[in-house]
Image: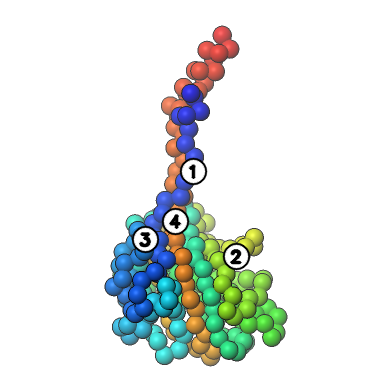
Amino acid sequence: MALSLFGVAANAQLLSDNFNRPNGSLVGTIPTPGPGSAWIAHSGASGDLLIQSGQALVQHGIPAEDAHSIFASQSAGVLAADFDITVNDDTVITAGDSEYFAHFMIDGSNLFYSRLYVVPANVGGNDYTLGLSTSSGGFTETFPTDFSYGNQIHVRLTYDFGTSLSSLTVGATTITSSVVSAAASLDSFALRQSDSINNESILVDNLVVTIPEPTTFALGGFGLLTLVLARRRS
């Protein structure tokens, strides 16, 4: 009886989008199955950021539209975005090249956090790896594993309001940013297109943004459990 008074920690789902909608502009479409606001453009040329075959297509190069979906504003805990990516190109990412393509942000501002980059591989001849920064100034950490074009990988991108740091997890490996940058709150997840030396494309799928909910443990529950145990001992 006493154990039924206790809950378990859960994840509050803030945004969920599998992009299973007709091909065309991402902007103006509503996340499927939701929650999350319709995607909103915050820079670039209208109609450049696309849905293609049930995935969001981030193209670096001529396309320049950036867009975000708004969720309930958060200011505590660890904000996390889980999603799948497939990076495609026909040449390896070269030294000095990097482009961030996903991040958290504050709607109506240019305050971007937990920037995720495609960057040169650790080993020459490999296709690419991923970079991470807490906010601006270029990537500060490089993921230790290299990846191949055309292979889908699952990534977890976080921002910790307690430490003001970001992290990136792929598989069993996590890297954490080294530069502190405090965000008072965050309320959006964004996709970004840009232009640099090597303009790869990135397919994004199965996006889920969460933040841990407080456990449902309560002092009253602990007190009642103590009372039940005391009565059993008497």
- The amino acid marked with disc number 4 is Thr
Q: Of all residues shown, which one is farthest toward the top?
A: 234
> At which x and y percent is residue 172?
64, 60
Q: Work out how far the residue at label 2 is from the one at label 4, CA to CA, in angstroms.
A: 17 Å
Q: Which marked residue is nearer to the observer: mark 4 or mark 3? A: 3
Q: Earlier in the sequence, mark 1 or mark 3?
A: 1
Residue placed under numbered mark 4 in the picture: 210
Mark 2–mark 1 CB contact (< 8 Å):
no
The answer for how far apart the CA atoms under marks 2 and 3 are is 24 Å
The reply to whether callout 2 and callout 3 are in contact (CB within 8 Å) is: no
Residue wearing tag 2: 170
User: Could you tell me the amino acid type at mark 1?
Assistant: Ala
The relative height of residue 231 versus residue 143 in the rendered view (above or below) is: above
Count residues near mark 3 (Cα–Cα under 10 Å), then give few for <14, some for 14-19, many for 20+: few
Q: Is residue 198 above or below residue 183?
A: below
CA distance for labels 4 and 3: 14 Å
Q: Residue at x 67, y 71 (%)?
A: 144
Horizontal arrangement in the rendering, residue 42 relative to residue 101 (left or right)? left
Q: Which residue is mark 3?
A: 33
SS at badge 2 = strand
Q: Quick one: 193 or 138, which is closer to the camera?
A: 193
Viewer-nearest of labels 2 and 3?
Answer: 3
Residue at left 62%, top 73%? 142
